[in-house]
Image (cartoon, rainbow, N blue to C red):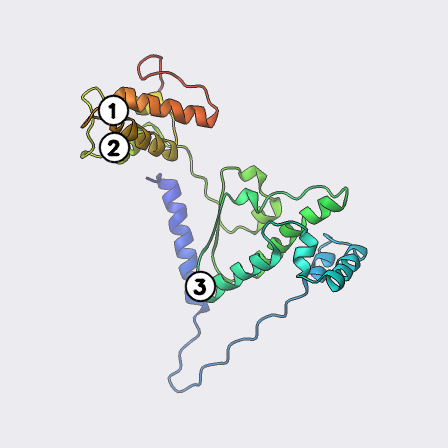
Amino acid sequence: MLDQSLGRRLREIQDAKAGEETAAEPPVEASAEPPPPPAPPARKPLGRLLVEKGALSEEDLEVALERQRTEGGPLGQILLGMGAVTEQNLARVFDAAEQAQAVLLFDEADALFGRRTEVSDARDRYANLETAYLLSRMERFEGLTVLATNLRQNLDPAFIRRLEFVLDFEEPSLREREALWRAHLPPGAPLAADVDLHALAVAYPLVGALIRNAAVGAAFLAAAGAQDAAISTDHLTAAVRREYQKAGRAFPGAPGTRATRST
């Protein structure tokens, strides 16, 4: 369920990508030999690239190279110095996506594309290495990348500048919340006569994921009770209360117990 403005933005993205593919197609000549594939651009070593980007000093690079000679192992892993996603693993992901012409989706993108910190010691410097690599690799990536996050403010501004389109998905309105409840509690579900999905939508301004969780939770509560028990308002209210507790939010009460305002 998308509003009209968001739907227009999505169509703009579709038209833009279709235009890029059309512009990229070379003219076909029946008698001409296909041109040889272009040579891939030369990739600079990670350490040298980080020095040029200002994320690493020459002295630190020399120390890392010496450790690589004495201890062995990939330079990127030595530089990062942690068991998180390494530069080598990220490179393999981007390379595989380019070869397969696949779309890269980074869910919870703020965890990987977060803001760089002020460099006050070696730990801060190394913490920024992954972000510096991602910035350079994103610029060279030929495919489509999608970043999804609920914390846009935590993304590094340099990534925001490199995004061609930014879409904001607003929280569902009253009508959309009611439609979501009906989608997750279809006509075939055994609902008690006291269930009022409109009242649930009015009382609880939840996003789609929490509505889905509450609907599933209520079904389990009903199944744990008497045999062939229907899903009642009490089951739904208890499931919604659990979602509010999980989110650390105050539960507003059962439907109809407080004044509500349509949104």
Residue position marked by numbered label 2 in the rendering: 185
Name the quadrant containing residue 70.
bottom right
Picture residue at 54% right of the left edge, 61% below the top: 92
- Element type where label 3 sits in the image: loop
| Quadrant in the picture for the C terminus | top left
**If you read the primary sequence from the N terminus, does the residue marked by circle 1 or circle 2 appear first?**
2
Residue 225 is labelled as 1
- Quadrant of residue 238 in the image? top left
Q: Are marks 1 and 2 in contact (CB under 8 Å)?
A: no
Crowding near pointer 1: few (<14 within 10 Å), some, many (20+)? Answer: few
Quadrant where the N terminus sits is: top left
Q: Is residue 238 visible?
A: yes
Q: CA distance from mark 3 to mark 2?
A: 38 Å
Q: Which residue is mark 3?
A: 101
What amino acid is at disc 1?
Gly
Q: Position of residue 137 (x, y in %)?
A: 59, 58
Q: Residues within 10 Å of mark 2 (few under 14, many from 20)?
A: some
Sequence-first tag of 3 and 2: 3
